[in-house]
Image: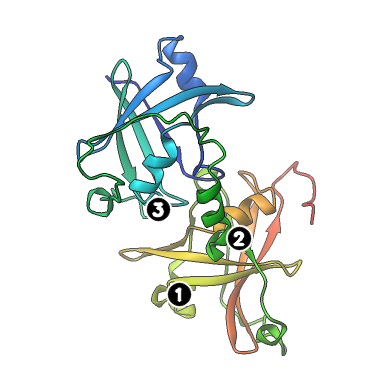
Amino acid sequence: MDPSFFKPLVGDFLHKLQIPSAFIEKMEGKLASKLVLKYECGRLYYVKMKELEDGHFFVNGWPDFVKDHGLEYGDFVVFRLIEDSTFHVTIYDPSMCEKQCCDSHRYKNDSDQKHSLSDQDHTKGPNLAKKNQESPIKMEIESSDDEWKGPCSNTDDAPSFTLVLNEANKIYLPLESSFVTKTGLAKKEEVKVRDKEGRKWVVKIVKDGKRVGLTRGWSDIFMAHRLKKGDSCIFKYLSKGGVGFIQVDVKRGRGRPPKIP
C-alpha cells in the first residue's frame, strides 16, 4: 500500500503546506527534498520540501499548485506517494466530494507540461497573501452601524441548536436540518456570524444534498475562540435592523478554562 497523508487546507496554506510529522517519521529520512506533485490531468509540479522551525513543509512550487488548481480554504487534499519522489494528489471540497480542477487551470504557459522550482522563496508569496487578505469570507468583517441598528428579534423564540465539537468541526460545521429549514439558510450562499463580544464574520454555506454546513470563514471563528474538541457551541438565528445572522455562544468542555475574549 502506498504511503499517504491527508491535509485540510487551513491557516497559511497559500504559501506553504506542512507535512504531518508522523508521515515524516514513517518515511525514515527517505523522502527527497525535491518532490513532484501529480494531479489527475497528468500535469507535474516540482516542489521543494524544506525543514522549518515548526516542521517540514512544501514551499517553492507549492503556491503555483494552489493557484493553478483553484485550491480554497476548507478544501481537503490527499497525497499518495506513488514513487520515491512523486505524490499523486486528490482534491476534495468541503462537501466531501472530489473536486474537479482540470478545467479551471490557469497556466502561465500552456505548452509547458512541467512547473520547475523557482529560486524565489515562495514561503512569502506577497501577491497571494494580498489576495487572501482582501477576501471578506476569510476575515473578521466590519459592518456599518446602520446595518446593526435596532433591537434584535425575539431571542426566546429564535431557531437554535447546540453542537459538541469534534476535530472535523475545525473546518466544517454541520447545521441541524430543523435549524436550516426554519432559517432558510439552504437558499443562501453565505451568512453573517456574530459572537457575544460583537465580532462579526461572513461565512460560506455549502450544500450537499440535504446536508448544509458552514465552511470558509468558520475556521477563523474556531481559531478566534480557541475552540477544542469537547467544547460546545450554541447557534441562534437572530435578526437586527432587518439583517439575519447567526449568533454563536461558546461553552467550554469539561476541564477547559473559560474562553478568552
Percent x, y for residue 247? Answer: 64, 70
Q: In which quarter of the image is residue 229?
A: top right
At label 3, the amino acid type is Pro
Viewer-side label of 2, 1: 2
Structural crowding at the residue carrying mark 3, measured as other residues with C-alpha within 10 Å and reported as few (<14), some (14–19) or many (≥20): many
Secondary element under disc 2, as helix, strand or loop, is loop
Percent x, y for residue 156? Answer: 67, 81
* Cβ atoms at labels 2 and 1 below 8 Å apart: no
User: For mark 3, what is the residue?
Assistant: 94
Q: Residue 139 carries which label?
A: 2
Q: Residue 87 carries which label?
A: none
> Mark 3 or 2 closer to N-term?
3
Residue under the point 47% across and 79% down = 182
Towards the viewer: 105 or 2: 105
Secondary element under disc 1, as helix, strand or loop, is helix
At label 1, the amino acid type is Leu
At label 2, the amino acid type is Met
User: For mark 1, what is the residue?
Assistant: 185
The residues bearing labels 2 and 1 have C-alpha atoms spaced at a distance of: 21 Å
47 w.r.t. 208: above or below: above
> Mark 2 or 1 closer to N-term?
2
> Mark 1 or 3 closer to N-term?
3
Towards the viewer: 7 or 37: 37
Residue 254 as seen in the image, left or right of residue 203:
right
Percent x, y for residue 56? Answer: 53, 24
Residue 222 as seen in the image, left or right of residue 93:
right
